[in-house]
Image (cartoon, helix red, strand yellow):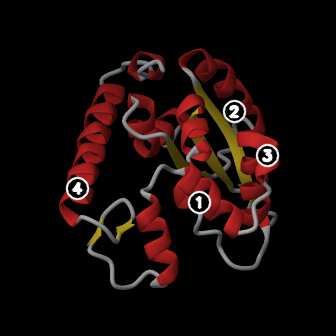
Amino acid sequence: MERTFEAVLVEQCAPTLAGVKPASLFRWQEDGRLPAGRLVYQWARVLAPFGLAVRIVKTCPQTGDCLIYLYRVRWLRRILAEADNRAFLEGRGYDLSHGCSGLLEQLSHRLCLAEEFPHEIGVFLGYPLEDVVGFIENQGRNYTCCGCWKAYGDPEAARRCFACYRRCTEVYCRNLRMGMPVTRLIVAA
């Protein structure tokens, strides 16, 4: 499959497009056609009617590569409104007073710093809080299962989730290769 924005979007974000995962993150390397900002702007307009949003959360100053975040707006708001997640993010230094958009701005700022990677990003991707905290406390070691992320809780539940995401990605990529437009693959919120 040609490395178009659409192909990478489907390959990296199929579970989010399908409505089984709240958010996804992927790297986009400029391909000389349209600048990333323009692509993201165009896709934001296409995805908005489906309850999805997309934004650049980091741009590499050396290469111009972008980290792009796709998310289901209402689902992310619910995640970020959960008391345990709010307490965790506040404990990591996030200012909770600016809502979902403000939290995403703070995450983007932390991603752009050359210091420590903000592993709390797992909350924004819909990973179980137990796994995010476990990863941070164990510095990525001692996990019970590894797939789309390192799990620290029930390994069977994590494996089922990983398998669901893998099947979804396979089906979506196959449908895209067969010519189905991305907009036909999206499950509306």
- Marks 2 and 3, how far apart at CA: 23 Å
Q: CA distance from mark 2 to mark 4?
A: 36 Å
Dot 1 or dot 4, earlier in sequence? 1
For label 1, count other residues whose C-alpha is less than 10 Å away and answer few (under 14), some (14-19) or many (20+).
some
The answer to whether mark 2 and mark 3 are in CB contact below 8 A is no
- Disc 4 target residue: 157
The amino acid type, in three-letter code, at marker 4 is Ala
- The residue mark sitting in front, 2 or 4, is 4
Q: Secondary structure at mark 2?
A: helix
**Residue to which mark 2 is pinned:** 39
User: Where's residue 122, x and y in %?
Assistant: 52, 59
User: Compared with residue 102, is residue 60 higher up or lower down, i.e. above or below?
Assistant: below
Can residue 26 be seen here? The reply is no
Identify the residue at horizontal 54%, vertical 44% (top origin). 79
**Residue 141 left/right relative to 6:** left
Which residue position holds label 1? 121
- Residue 72 position in % (x across, y down): 54, 32
Given this view, does label 2 or label 3 mark the residue nearer the observer? 3
Q: Amino acid at mark 2?
A: Leu
Residue with the mark numbered 3:
102
